[in-house]
Structure formats: C-alpha cells, structure tokens
Image: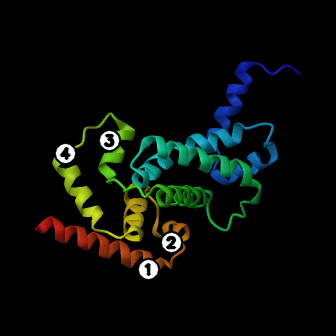
C-alpha cells in the first residue's frame, strides 16, 4: 500500500486534535521508530517550556538546552509515565528540575516574566519601567515563591498542578502565592 504525502498530512492533522493522554498512548506504541505523536506533544509544549526555563536561567540558549534535555528525557522515559498526574504537570516538573539543575550549576539569576515574554514573543513591546519594577518585585521573592508565581501567571497552571510539580500541599501553594502577591503589591505602593 502506497502512502502519499496527502495521507501523512491528514494523519498529522488528526493527531493535533487528540488529548495529551491519547497522544502519550500512541507515542508509547510508536516510539522509538515512529515519532509523529511525540512530535505533536513536543510542539504543543515547546514554547511554554522555553518561557518557563528562560525565567529561571536568564539565557535563551540555556533555556533551549534545558527544553531539549527535557524533551529527550520525555522521549526516553515516556513509557514509564504512570499518569499519576497529567502529562502537562509531568513535563513541567521535568523542565522545572532541568532548570533548577542548570541554575545550581551555573548560579544564574532568574529574570522577570515580562522580559521572558518579550524575548519569546518579540511581537509585543515591553514597557521598560514596568519591566524593571516587575523584576525588582520578583527578585524580592524566594525561589519557591517565585516559582509558584511564574507557574501560575506565565505557565497558566492550576494550583493543583503547581503543587504536583513542586511537591507541596495545595493549601501551601495557595497560601504562598497569596503572600507573594501581597508582598509584590506592598512594594508597588512604595
């Protein structure tokens, strides 16, 4: 049976419509020889992971390397994904750990959310005064609190997903998020 280019395009389009869980199941059947479902997952999360990693590493090149390592880790261990959490939570946890490992090794400073969005989007301009203030506000937070704020605002994650990623209780994550925002708001009033 001949498979032409048009048929391959239809298969890829159909994969785009599937949920993460369905793509994981298909990728587990396909890998390592066929990568179409894995590639859909890769493209679905690539941009978001770059933004998250960039916020930790303050370097687009380092962020891209961390995401590449994350996706390689996913490729090699997808069969061990136990679905105790969502795929999104699992991949964010891997990226988070990759970033923290790189941050510890290189002792880099994190950057603010607006600057990361500017680098990634390039289509939007960032008000430098606002960006500077946001950077100052985020710099006052602990690494754990900053992680929660970045995942909630930039990563658009639910509190339960953040709790899974950083392995904290849901109530602790909510409380730390609220306190971090209050701290940043108090700085704005000065």
Spot the residue most to the left: 190
Q: Earlier in the sequence, mark 4 or mark 1?
A: 4
Identify the mark at residue 128; answer none if there is no mark.
4
Quarter of the picture holding the N terminus: top right
How packed is label 2: few (under 14 Cα within 10 Å), some, or many (20 or more)? some
How packed is label 1: few (under 14 Cα within 10 Å), some, or many (20 or more)? few
Residue depicted at x 81% and y 22%? 3
Asked if disc 2 and disc 1 are in contact, CB closer than 8 Å, the reply is yes
In the rendered image, which residue does mark 3 sit on? 118
Identify the mark at residue 161; answer none if there is no mark.
none
The span from disc 3 to disc 4 (Cα, nearest Å) is: 11 Å
Residue 99, given in percent of the width and then of the height, sits at 50, 56
User: Between residues 143 and 103, which one lies in front from this camera angle?
Assistant: 103
Element assignment for label 1: helix
In the rendered image, which residue does mark 1 sit on? 172
Q: Earlier in the sequence, mark 3 or mark 1?
A: 3
Q: Earlier in the sequence, mark 2 or mark 1?
A: 2
């Amino acid at each position: 049976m001949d498979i032409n280019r048009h048929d391959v395009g239809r298969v890829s389009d159909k994969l785009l419509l599937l949920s993460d869980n369905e793509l994981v199941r298909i990728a587990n059947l396909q890998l390592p020889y066929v990568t179409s479902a894995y590639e859909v997952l890769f493209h679905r999360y690539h941009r978001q992971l770059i933004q998250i990693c960039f916020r930790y590493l303050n370097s687009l090149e380092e962020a891209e390397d961390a995401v590449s390592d994350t996706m390689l880790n996913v490729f090699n261990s997808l069969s061990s994904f136990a679905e105790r959490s969502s795929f999104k939570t699992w991949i964010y946890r891997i990226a988070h750990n990759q970033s923290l490992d790189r941050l510890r090794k290189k002792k880099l400073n994190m950057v603010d959310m607006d600057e990361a969005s500017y680098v990634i989007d390039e289509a939007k301009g960032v008000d430098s005064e606002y960006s500077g203030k946001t950077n100052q506000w985020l710099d006052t937070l602990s690494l754990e609190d900053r992680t929660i704020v970045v995942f909630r605002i930039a990563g658009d994650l639910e509190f339960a997903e953040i709790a899974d990623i950083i392995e904290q209780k849901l109530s602790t994550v909510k409380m730390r998020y609220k306190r971090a925002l209050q701290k940043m708001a108090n700085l704005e009033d000065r």
